[in-house]
Image (cartoon, helix red, strand yellow):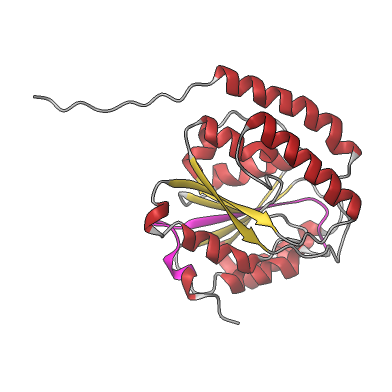
Amino acid sequence: MNAPASVVNAPANGVTIVIPVYNEQAAIGELLTEVFAALAQARDFEIVVVDDGSADDTPAVLAQARGQHGGRLRVLRHRVRSGQSAAMRTGITAAAYPWIATLDGDGQNDPADIPPLLAALQEPANHAVAMVCGRRRRRQDSWLKRISSRIANGVRRRLLRDETLDTGCGLKVFRRELFLRLPWFDHMHRFLPALARREGATIISMDVRHRPRTRGESKYGVHNRLWVGIVDLIGVMWLQRRGKVVVSEELENR
């Protein structure tokens, strides 16, 4: 299976695919095979999987995958579970390339959508874009998850004015240096577009596919997102009020 030709036009100087995982022994092996297939024609890329202290056989599956895929697959492991945002930060900090593409480790994101997101950055109209966000269409989740997500996205978009319809989609491409400038806190991955806009970044969204979860169990539910999400939302609103985009220029000697 060949990847779309657009993947050859990946951002200058390469891209690191960051995949945070926790107890994904049933999904991560096949997902990695799909990611390598999607990027088969790319030259400058690597995949960094961050195992967030899995208690199942995920480490063994990743060890086998490293033997199969070689040096382009790097595996990092947290000794204790630290959360998805911490796992993303670990992977992005360790990344070798200036562009980052993220996707969830449960297999619901389709790796075949990575090349179009990368290709969008090569369009002349998007030369100033620092982040491309996936926007899930025809979500393959339960009706309760779909409704709760729609409400949460609506409230967040109204209060934060981040102009992003689906900030919860794991598929995103952005500049590594942009992420490293953002204020870090637990669960910050849910607010990346708002935090990036706070830094003055230009962001666009693109439709991506969403697949049903066929292996493993979801790590998130309505209850363990609701109250934490409210507290985080208030915190991001505070950051927005206290933040200011400063534009400077270098003056030439005359």
18 in magenta: yes
In the displayed structure image, the side of residue 207 where residue 129 appears, left or right:
left
Q: Position of residue 249 (x, y in %)?
A: 28, 28
In the displayed structure image, the side of residue 196 where residue 222 appears, left or right:
right
In the displayed structure image, the side of residue 102 where residue 81 appears, left or right:
right
Judge whether residue 159 can be spotted in this image. Answer: yes
Q: Where is residue 151 in the image (x, y as percent from the top left)?
A: 80, 41
Seen in the picture, residue 204 relative to 33 is either above or below; the reply is above
Residue drawn at the location 90% of the way across and 49% of the way down:
144
Seen in the picture, residue 104 relative to 90 is either above or below; the reply is below
Count of numbered labels shown in the rendering: 0
Residue drawn at the location 47% of the way across and 70% of the way down:
6
Q: Residue furthest bottom?
A: 1
Judge whether residue 49 can be spotted in this image. Answer: no
Q: Which residue lies furthest to the top in this view?
A: 242
Q: Which residue lies furthest to the left in this view?
A: 254
Front residue of 34 and 64: 34
Q: Position of residue 3 (x, y in %)?
A: 55, 75
Instruction: Please state, as top left, top right, bottom left or bottom right, where the N terminus lies in the image.
Output: bottom right
Residue drawn at the location 53% of the way across and 21% of the way down:
243
Front residue of 55 and 144: 144
Q: Which region shows up in magenta?
A: 7-25
Q: Position of residue 8 (x, y in %)?
A: 44, 70
100 in magenta: no
Q: Quadrant of residue 167?
A: top right
Front residue of 47 and 38: 38
Q: In which quarter of the image is residue 66?
A: bottom right
Instruction: Please state, as top left, top right, bottom left or bottom right, where the C terminus lies in the image.
Output: top left
Front residue of 95 and 65: 95
